[in-house]
Image: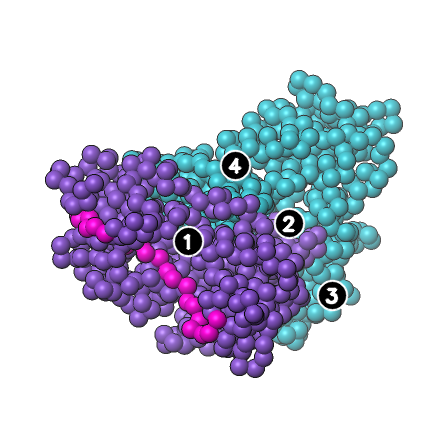
Chain colours: A purple, B cyan
């Protein structure tokens, strides 16, 4: 098969990476341009396309039946839609000058060049793996890919002991702690920070800590994992920190991810301070008219701080893909940026945040007032009303909303959307107090908890 | 006791109406001004203060333990806070010229005048009662006040038959249908309109209709109640329409409410086309520096249509009270208006709306595109994901969001808040597609249903 540039008049789009951003871009470009106008070639080094990595903890925990359900579109389905998808094929070099990529078939080892008119880089993120002895021992698992998830599930099926150690207490860490509790493991979470969920301020992270302990999860903060200890069989038997040893039949690494931009860096493409590709608002790599990038390998503009951030999240990747595909197809769309919204849960505890934490605000020179209130998810008198804590930051003097963090039970998490939209609109907390939010006793107290926080913030802004 | 104006130097605030708006205003004024600066006299003709009328259907249905739980503050608690509260005392006249009100003690019948420096009118709304034979028969109940609720509960306790007829299929009607189903009644709802929930477009009301029938509620549309038929004992035995008779052991009237502005009208205060008092943004009655009005007796500005509406809703009444009390106390606050958000449920069906329906948009001269999409409350693969229908209206050409209606199960109702904030901010549907909303598989598909609707609306606006 001739992998060099075809001589026909069609343009060729090359996509590197077959998950959310890459395949959304390919699919949207295909919707906008017929195969006789635009050829689309996509490279994916793994076994799967268009899958929800965010769903892996729930698959492990039993809330998702199987890996097939996490796959939005299989390679075959993409091919049926006119995308030339090359699975198990890793791109090893981008030649920006000559507009071509080199790719290796991982099964045969064969390498070849494919030229492009337009290129989409969607190489995703790679998990941070601690550089310590034993980190690769059998029984130690990451949960970044479907393959990782399957490997963990296989281990869980064959491991007799019920002691699990989770390293890291961010989203992946707490979600995996939940998954393992749901599978009747004794779970210990080892956390470098002072409280779990460092995407929250520590006072809010403390609430998560207490709730996790209430669920029977052992939470160890301020600790550094130094070594994975193995038994005579070579399998993991414990995790060591500077202070102690934690026996473990299985270890899950949930320390976070970094943008996978090895190729981009080698090609001389612009990277930001977090290691992600830098793009313009149309998701084009800065300075490159015919190269787009999106998903977990790029940095995004934080609309509240005005600075770039790296956020690995499927919802952004899908939006990026949509914008990129529209641009590739000759249309117009932009991704204006994020406000930093995230929501998660540990069993029935819902955890949400948007905008800036206290330390984020300080770092970018914003002065602020901060308030924390307690309210309930429903009218206090309505059955099932559950407590909810809302923390709100507003800019000093102007009263502009800067951030919201919510910890509570049913109905708490998605309330963060109110603040996400208000942040996007640049609202002041004073304007927020008059927001016309949905009210009925089964859904909210007469003052929604977010508005209770806004009222308290208004009072505090006045004295600022 | 001398009810005429006191000779001391204190100002006197008189409040007419002891529920949400009136007592919120009184309480906020009290927080801002000590009793030696401001005397506060409040008149309430009923037995209760500061209660949640919205909670009555849930009390009847068993989700709220008792009427005490619906009372946020008792008369005694208000008095302890320095408010001179006169219960069972009905104001019968406002003398704007001489700045005084005449009130009658409903138990003794004694009348007297009380002068005021500042006046707050919070007379609420009165239920629409059909003008037909038998409407006052024993067994026919409104559900506007706590007294109404108690009377209905007493009737249900003593009635052997299990057939209930609900007249009206708006919020109160569907909530009462749920309450009666929860109490094992056979429920028939008689509705004048073509579908229940006329606050939705009929195509969305149709979904409510189907769900109600799925719950075993008999829904009769396009029908006019003509008569309540009574038995030999004088009690209700059936409800007659132009076409049929519906046997009934109990009848609940849920036809809606009108502003209670009899006093205000007699005093020559300005009323709008819906019969409610007209105020400025600080909730002062137009043209009257020292008279405020709020809650169910006023009209409010609809920020989307630019016209006044009448909306009886506790959440607005509380906000009005807060703004009024701040103004009375010498501070500054405004109520900018509403976008028309409402949420309700029938058993596990959640129903929400904000902004304009199709007919509202037409009435005010707005041209629009309309889209309807189906999605799920959680990621489709996550256990408990339930279907959700979202309808979205956007202005032709500009793409400005005009309204959203949502019908679904768990997690559907409060999603309307996303649209409520976006409407308040005047966002376009194009801007909405990039909103950074909370995403995780237990909370949302990767594209939130509201964003799926926004994407479809964008495509349709393009061709408009």
Residue A442 bears which disc, if any? 2
The chain identifier of the residue carrying mark 3 reads B
Q: Which residue sits furthest front? A: A232
Residue A314 bears which disc, if any? 1
Considering only vertical position in the picture, is A453 above or below A381?
A: below
N-terminal of the pair, mark 4 or mark 3, is: 3
Residue at 18%, 42% in the rendered image: A2
Residue at 35%, 57% in the rendered image: A124
Considering only vertical position in the picture, is B55 above or below B82?
A: above
Residue at 70%, 59% in the rendered image: B72
Q: CA distance from mark 4 to mark 3?
A: 40 Å
- Secondary structure beneath dot 4 equals loop
Please say whether residue A19 is visible from this viewpoint: yes
User: Residue B115's spot in the image, x, y percent?
Assistant: 65, 62
Residue at 61%, 40% in the rendered image: B349
Q: Nearer the viewer, mark 4 or mark 3?
A: 4
Q: Which residue is mark 4?
A: B200
Q: Is residue A193 magenta?
A: no
The quarter holding residue A207 reads: bottom right
User: Residue A26's spot in the image, x, y percent?
Assistant: 30, 44
- Secondary structure beneath dot 3 equals helix
N-terminal of the pair, mark 1 or mark 2, is: 1
Q: Which residues are magenta?
A: A111-134
Other residues around mark 2 within 10 Å, as few (<14) / some (14–19) / many (≥20): many
The chain identifier of the residue carrying mark 1 reads A
Q: Which residue is mark 3?
A: B77
Instruction: Tell me if label 1 and label 3 are in contact, CB under 8 Å.
Output: no
């Amino acid at each position: 098969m001739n992998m060099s540039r075809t001589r026909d008049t069609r343009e060729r789009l090359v996509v590197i990476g077959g998950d959310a951003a890459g395949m959304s871009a390919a699919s949207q470009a295909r919707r906008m341009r017929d195969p006789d106008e635009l050829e689309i070639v996509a490279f994916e080094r793994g076994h799967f396309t268009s899958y929800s990595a965010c769903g892996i903890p729930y698959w492990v925990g039993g809330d998702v039946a199987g890996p097939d359900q996490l796959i939005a579109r299989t390679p075959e389905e993409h091919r049926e839609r006119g995308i030339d998808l090359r699975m198990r094929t890793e791109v090893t070099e981008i030649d920006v000058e000559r507009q071509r990529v080199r790719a290796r078939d991982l099964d045969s080892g064969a390498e070849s060049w494919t030229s492009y008119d337009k290129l989409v880089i969607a190489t995703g993120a790679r998990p941070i793996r601690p550089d310590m002895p034993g980190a690769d021992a059998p029984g130690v698992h990451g949960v970044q890919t479907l393959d990782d998830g399957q490997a963990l599930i296989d281990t869980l099926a064959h491991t007799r002991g019920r002691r699990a150690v989770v390293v890291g207490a961010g989203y992946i860490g707490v979600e995996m702690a939940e998954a393992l509790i749901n599978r009747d493991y004794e779970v210990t979470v080892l956390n470098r920070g002072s409280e779990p969920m460092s995407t929250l301020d520590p006072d809010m992270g403390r609430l998560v800590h207490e709730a996790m302990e209430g669920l029977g999860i052992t939470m160890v903060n301020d600790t550094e994992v130094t070594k994975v200890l193995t038994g005579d069989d070579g399998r993991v038997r414990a995790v060591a920190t500077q202070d102690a040893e934690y026996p473990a039949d299985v270890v899950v690494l949930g320390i976070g991810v970094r943008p996978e931009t090895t190729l981009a860096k080698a090609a001389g493409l612009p990277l930001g301070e977090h290691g992600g590709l830098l793009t313009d608002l149309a998701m084009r790599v800065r300075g490159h008219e015919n190269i787009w990038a999106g998903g977990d390998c790029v940095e995004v503009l934080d609309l509240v701080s005005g600075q770039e951030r790296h956020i690995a999240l499927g919802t952004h990747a899908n939006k990026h893909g949509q914008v990129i595909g529209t641009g590739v197809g000759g249309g117009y769309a932009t991704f204006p940026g994020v406000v930093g919204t995230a929501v998660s849960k540990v069993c029935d505890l819902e955890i949400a945040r948007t905008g800036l934490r206290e330390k984020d605000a300080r770092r970018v020179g914003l002065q602020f007032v901060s308030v924390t209130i307690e309210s309930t998810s429903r009218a206090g008198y309505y059955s099932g009303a559950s407590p909810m804590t809302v923390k709100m930051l507003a800019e000093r003097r102007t009263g502009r909303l800067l951030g919201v963090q919510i910890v509570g039970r049913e109905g708490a998490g998605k309330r963060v959307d109110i603040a996400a939209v208000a942040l996007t609109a640049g609202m002041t907390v004073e304007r927020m107090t008059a927001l016309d939010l949905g009210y009925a006793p089964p859904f909210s107290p007469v003052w929604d908890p977010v508005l209770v926080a806004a009222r308290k913030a208004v009072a505090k802004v006045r004295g600022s």
